[in-house]
Image (cartoon, rainbow, N blue to C red):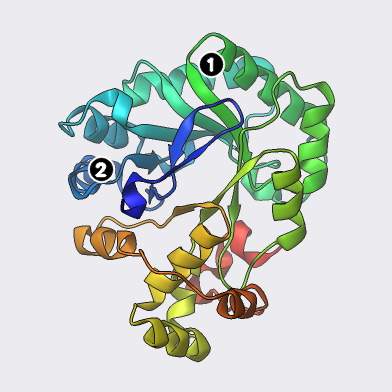
Amino acid sequence: MTVLEETYTLSNGVEIPRLGLGTWFIDDDKAADAVRAAVQIGYRNVDTAQAYGNERGVGEGVRTSGVPREELFVSTKLAAEIKDYDRALAAIDGSLVKLDLDRIDLMLIHSPQPWDDFRGGDYAQGNREAWRALEDAHQAGKIRAIGVSNFQQHDLENVLQGATVVPHVNQLLVHAGNTPAELLAYCESKQILVEAYSPIAHGAMLKNAGIRVMAEKYGVSVPQLCIRYTLQLGTVSLPKTANPEHMRSNADVDFEISDADMDALRGLRDVDYGDHSAFPVFSGK
């Protein structure tokens, strides 16, 4: 069995493939081709978001992939700016229309704060309202699983206060050089599966000499080592690419990183994201 066929089971019994295709920065008019290529290679998990502006293309790729809909796992995210019940409910329906799918497999609150105030003010009440909208859409059968993204422990605790459903997923920035051990442990204690986005740290890892040496030891590329690392942490790995060659390579990770090397990768710190430091999720604000 290859990694593309392996799954985790969410706390509500829904199965999610361990490796997925991230679609951040893939333009709407190129998204359908990227999704079709990924599905042909064997990917069954596709991740998008309202903020990516490519839900229409992703949905088209899913519908025209030649694979039955029930074999594909499609995630999207509620825009970070939406912090009230009515707008959240309308936006969930908006995603279903844009994707042109009868249901969404997983929908997340994209961030606990709007992007222009990331890690800033207090949106506790708004997050609880957005969560209630996701719970109601989940109850109505529009979404098979619900979760959050970029949520710290206190953000999760806030949502849990009035929740009828514990988030099934928390999608986080996780990669060698940025391994939030305490948050990962907390999520595990609540049966919240973590998804790792940007497992290659936007390419910042390609410049890390130590990582390059370790990859050579295993006879793999730096991206393959980084993806394997996030899988061995027990997360869903979501490398993003529109390039079919990279998709193939990213899925060719059926090797095992030793415990000692896992510890070394866990201990890595200080990553320079270069050009990508401008993004709130990378600036560490």
Left or right of 22, for residue 108: right
Q: In this view, does 189 lie above or below 90?
A: below
Residue 121 at least partly seen:
no
Point 71% across, 45% down: residue: 187
Q: Of 132 and 258, which appears nearest the observer?
A: 258
Residue 155 appears at what percent x and percent y? 78, 41
Point 54% across, 8% down: residue: 140
Quarter of the image with the C terminus is: bottom right
Residue 164 appears at what percent x and percent y? 74, 18
Are the two marked residues, 2 and 1, in contact with CB atoms closer than 8 angstroms?
no
Q: Of 19 and 6, which appears nearest the observer?
A: 6
Point 57% across, 69% down: residue: 277
Name the N-terminal-most of marks 2 and 1: 2
Q: Classify 10 Å Cα crowding around label 1: few (below 14), some (14-19), many (20 and above).
A: few
Point 69% across, 28% down: residue: 83
Helix, strand, or loop for circle 1? helix
Left or right of 141, for residue 109: right
Q: Which amino acid does label 1 sit on?
A: Ala
Quadrant of residue 273 within the rendered picture: bottom right
Q: Which amino acid does label 2 sit on?
A: Val
Q: Classify 10 Å Cα crowding around label 2: few (below 14), some (14-19), many (20 and above).
A: many
Report the residue marked by disc 2.
Answer: 35
Quadrant of residue 170 within the rendered picture: top right
Helix, strand, or loop for circle 2? helix
The disc label shown at residue 20, or none: none
Q: Is residue 160 above or below residue 54?
A: above
Q: Is residue 223 above or below residue 146?
A: below
Report the residue marked by disc 1.
Answer: 90
Q: Of 180 and 14, which appears nearest the observer?
A: 14
Left or right of 127, for residue 231: left
Residue 21 appears at what percent x and percent y? 36, 49
